Image (cartoon, rainbow, N blue to C red):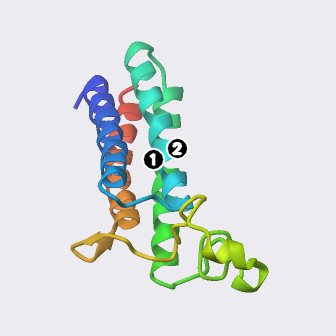
Amino acid sequence: MSRQISLIFATLGSIALLGGAFIFQALGYPPCAMCIWQRWPHGIAIALGVVAMLLPGRVLPALGAAAMATTAAIGVFHTGVERDWWEGPASCTGTGQSLGSLSGGDLLSTDGPLLVMCDVVSWEFAGLSMASWNAVLSLALLLFWLSALRRS
């Protein structure tokens, strides 16, 4: 597979994953903080892929591979938090702020942002959550980035 074809697949894959995340959000599955963290490397990879298709060299494919490895690692970590294999950030898991620190008005308020917990699986398919699917598919995209790097 040529460098250009590898870059096209890598870039389109991130576009698809990021687009899918936004579609799920539009369908009523708001993202948690770690879900948002997983989106950033895809956005970066899309920009890197577009530029890498125009410029030769090994730096951009290497950075794209690093972006995929990063989002896959966050996805694995997020999966572990969802499955109670380890603790996640206190700001978005069940170990976050206690109700005792909230006022009565805060407890009754329907205004303000929706807090989505990182340790709760809101959707899964074939036993894998969205975070798990992101990890698996990002690792597959990593192979395209590595192929582009090898052919640079």
In screen coordinates, is 77 left or right of 91? left
In this view, the residue in front, 2 or 36, is 36
Could you tell me which residue is drawn at 28 percent across and 29 percent down?
8
| Secondary structure category for the residue under label 2 | helix
State which quadrant residue 111 falls in: bottom right
Could you tell me which residue is drawn at 70 percent across and 73 percent down?
105
Residue 147, x across and y down, in percent: 34, 37
State which quadrant residue 96 falls in: bottom right
Tell me the amino acid under the disc marked 1: Met
In screen coordinates, is 111 left or right of 30? right
Circle 1 is placed at which residue position?
68
User: Rounded to the nearest whole Å, what is the CA distance between mark 2 and mark 1?
Assistant: 10 Å
Q: Farthest residue toward the top?
A: 54
Could you tell me which residue is drawn at 40 percent across and 13 percent down?
54
Residue 109, x across and y down, in percent: 61, 69
Residue 85, x across and y down, in percent: 51, 84
| Secondary structure category for the residue under label 1 | helix
In screen coordinates, is 105 left or right of 29? right
Q: Can residue 90 be seen in this view?
A: no
Circle 2 is placed at which residue position?
40
